Structures are given as C-alpha cells and as structure tokens.
Amino acid sequence: VFFQNFNPYRYSFKVNDQPSENYAMSSATGTSSLPRLVSPSDGSPLPASAAAPLLAGRRVALYFSAGWCPMCTSFEPDLKIFLATAANSGRPAALIYVGSDRSAGETARRAASLDCVAAVAHGADADAAKRRFRVWAGSERGELGDGRRSGVPALVVLDAAGDELAFVAAEADGAHALDTWPLDDVRGIWGA
C-alpha cells in the first residue's frame, strides 16, 4: 500500500511575522553551474538570462524522474501538495526536471505537466547531470553504470550557486523524504 501513513496536512510550515535573515535573498543566480536548460512548454533552449528570473527568490531542486516509472508518478501528487504548501507558507520552490524519459518530447511534456520552470536538455546534458549527482533510473545502468546513489524519483536541492545543498531520497523513502528538504536554509534561496 502506497504511503499508507502520508498526511498532506503535515506540511504546514510556520511563517515568521518578522523579517529574518533566513528569508534574505542571495545575490548569486546559480544559473552558470546548471546544465543546458530547455523550456518545458516547447523544448526550446532556455538561456541563463531567461532562467534566472524564473528561479529568483525560490528554493530550487533538480527533480530526477520518468513518466514510465510507477514510483515517480505515484510520488508526484504528494510532491505537488508539498510544493503548494511551501509556496502558501512563503517558501516558494521550483523544480528543474531531469528526465529519464525515452525522448526529448516526453521530457518536455513531463516537465510541463509537473509545472517545472525548466528541464535539463534530453540526452548528453541530462546524462551529465545524472552523473554529476549520481542519480539515474535502473534502466539507464547499462549506459551510465552502477555508481549511482539512487534511482528515480529523487530530488537534489541546490544552493544559490547551483551546487548540491541536500538530497531528497524519494525512491527509498517516498513522500516522507520531502521532510529532508531544508526549506529554511538561506543558502537554498536563489537571488534576483
């Protein structure tokens, strides 16, 4: 039984009434260390100058997933609830989709259906991101090897420089893994 004990209401984040350094924005855009991005609406290239405003003021994570993966599609309703709750509490987050899908078209469609701000370009760019963060689907082991730390679904929360801040092991822990996303860590808020 999938997520028998999952309670979407447990994602009720407390918001401080007073300004805090935890909500200060970094001046870094982080986009220079990201792989080549594409628009989820049509798969066209998304330059860093266009990506930066989409990520500004948000907590950003790479979402490793695939449309053919039942664990991924079962996890995603809980991920959407988590993201909506985070946004409603003043801690907006954004996903960049890293697909293990079979084609660039599937990757773009999945990214759009998940309201991702961008997707990593299908092919060599996605493979480079998978190798960098050591996350890929089991079906990709022949091409990418056995040195992964996780399969899909998984999220890599990025700091404002585009480096790993936290790993959300959704393949292993399901929706409960979302508790490990450090929403209040100022290093994870991308600047303008």
Image (tube, grey):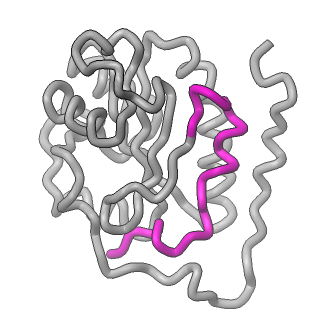
Q: Is residue 51 left or right of residue 185?
A: left
Q: Count the labels in the image.
A: 0
Name the residue nearer the viewer: 49 or 128.
128
Spot occupied by residue 166 in the image (x, y as percentages of width and height): 51, 53
Q: Is residue 24 visible?
A: yes
127 or 120: which is nearer to us? 127
Q: Quadrant of the C terminus?
A: bottom left
- The magenta region covers 169-192
Where residue 148 appears, x then y in whole percent? 39, 28
Quadrant into which the N terminus falls? top right
- Identify the residue at horizontal 25%, vertical 21% (top origin): 144
Query: Does 181 lie within the magenta span?
Result: yes
Which of these two is toward me, 97 or 173?
173
Seen in the picture, residue 171 relative to 67 is either above or below; the reply is below
Q: Residue at x 47, y 29 (%)?
A: 150
User: Eyeballing the image, is 185 above or below 67?
Assistant: below
- Whether the magenta-drawn stretch holds residue 92 is answered as no
- Tell me what residue is drawn at x 30 percent, y 33 percent: 130
- Residue 112 in sight here: no
**Is residue 75 shown left or right of residue 10?**
left
